[in-house]
Amino acid sequence: MGKKIFSGVQPTGNLHLGNYLGAIKNFVKLNNDNENDCIFCVVDLHAITVKQNFEELRNNIRETVATFIACGINHEKSIIFNQSAVPAHSEAAWILSCVARMGWLNRMTQFKEKAGKDKERASIGLYSYPILMAADILLYDSSHVPVGEDQKQHLELCRDIAQKFNNDYSVGTFFKAPEPLIQKQFARIMSLKDGTKKMSKSELSDLSRINLTDDKDVMVNKIKKAKTDALPIPGSIDELKKRPEAKNLLGIYSSLMDLTLEKSIYEFEGKNFSEFKSKLSQVLVEKINPISLEIKKLINEKKFLDKILFDGHVKANNIASKKLKKIHEIIGF
Ligand code: AQP
């Protein structure tokens, strides 16, 4: 039986190699399987949990759609829409926030990382972000959610919220507990400057990530400048574990080539980083440059992108508003 897929990407600009290898590449595979029903959402309500600039947000929404299409998602097979265009998301998030418990949210590590030391000044939206994410997923009876490894904890919370709602209102399996689809290997791509931190759009240094819109030379230069260590490439995963930057670069290479880490280690064992980096740059340009060129072409086709979002929101609204109506009935509104 086919899967009901839902996933979202924030239109916060700088979509990067981590977003691609950790999530979007998987969206494309799932979209290509005719058995699946896929919904991919541009989660702009999530984006405003940190301050956004009006013009940039508008452009980033279109750029996210352009990226989906450039990476290979077929908008005629999958629903692509903008979260704020479907009001049921905000309303369901409120209802679910009355079901979720403070203690559950207090455990979320992403809030701790994003809010940093100054938690008091973080928006309440940033704190309750996982509840909105649960609403996104549960409104569509999603069975599977393809995400990067960083979202695993939020998915577990979503399952807890679904179960508590079902128990509180004695409604059996009204909300379906979704399964995360997290790749077994390379599900967390790390910063090129620090192998212990995830590659991220909001990291200040552009050298920490490969943006999907980077030109060829920029990509090559970033790989050249990527942090490594003085030793040659080791011969085993155990040795690699102690060297986060080396592990990350070999992981990126393996993921781009669809190889296991073992195979890549075997290929480069004993070689120095300059040799490995030149091969990695070559592969990166080969795989990512066509995507980058396509995004740049599509970004100018505003009407085409807006039409995809419009058509998608009509379909999404149709599903989500029906589920919300049932939620109202269950609660007693
Ligand atoms: N470094 C990563 N490695 C693997 N997967 C990743 N994802 C994000 N970073 C990595 C996955 O990409 C999908 C979309 O992410 P998002 O844009 O919705 O939000 P995020 O996880 O908060 O991404 P960023 O880049 O870290 O954004 P900022 O800096 O704005 O917070 C998700 O499935 C995510 O797991």
Image: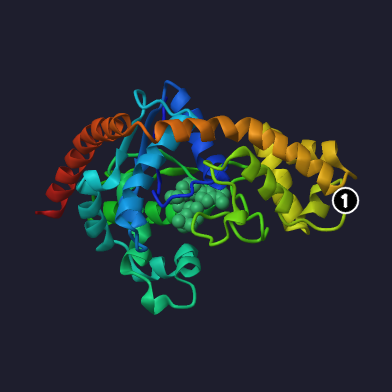
How many discs mark residues in the rendered view?
1
* Extreme residue toward the left, this view: 333
* Extreme residue toward the top, this view: 34
Image quarter (top left, top right, bottom left or bottom right) of the N terminus: top left
Residue beneath the point at 40% across and 66% down: 104
- What coloring was used for the rendering? rainbow
Residue beneath the point at 68% across and 58% down: 195
Q: From the top left corner, tell me how far across and down residue 8 is, in percent.
A: 39, 44
SS of the residue at dot 1?
loop
Splitting the image into 4 quarters, where does residue 49 fall? bottom left
* Extreme residue toward the right, this view: 270
Image quarter (top left, top right, bottom left or bottom right) of the C terminus: bottom left
Splitting the image into 4 quarters, where does residue 35 fall? top left
- Name the residue that disc number 1 marks: 232
Residue beneath the point at 84% across and 38% down: 266
**Is the CB of mark 1 within 8 Å of ligand 1?**
no
Using the image as rendered, state which of residue 60 and residue 155 is in the foreground.
60
Image position of 306 with respect to 169: above or below: above
Q: From the top left corner, tell me how far across and down residue 185 is, in percent.
A: 64, 43
Q: From the top left corner, tell me how far across and down residue 225 is, in percent.
A: 71, 53
Using the image as rendered, state which of residue 290 and residue 22 is in the foreground.
290
Tell me the crowding category of disc 1: few under 14, some 14 to 19, or many 20 or more residues within 10 angstroms, Cα based. some
Image position of 100 with respect to 29: above or below: below
Residue beneath the point at 35% across and 63% down: 51
Q: From the top left corner, tell me how far across and down residue 313 is, in percent.
A: 24, 36
Which amino acid is tagged 1?
Pro
**Apparent side of residue 122 relative to residue 17 in the rendered image (left or right):** left
Splitting the image into 4 quarters, where does residue 127 fall? bottom left
Evaluate whether residue 152 shows in this view.
no
Using the image as rendered, state which of residue 101 and residue 108 is in the foreground.
108
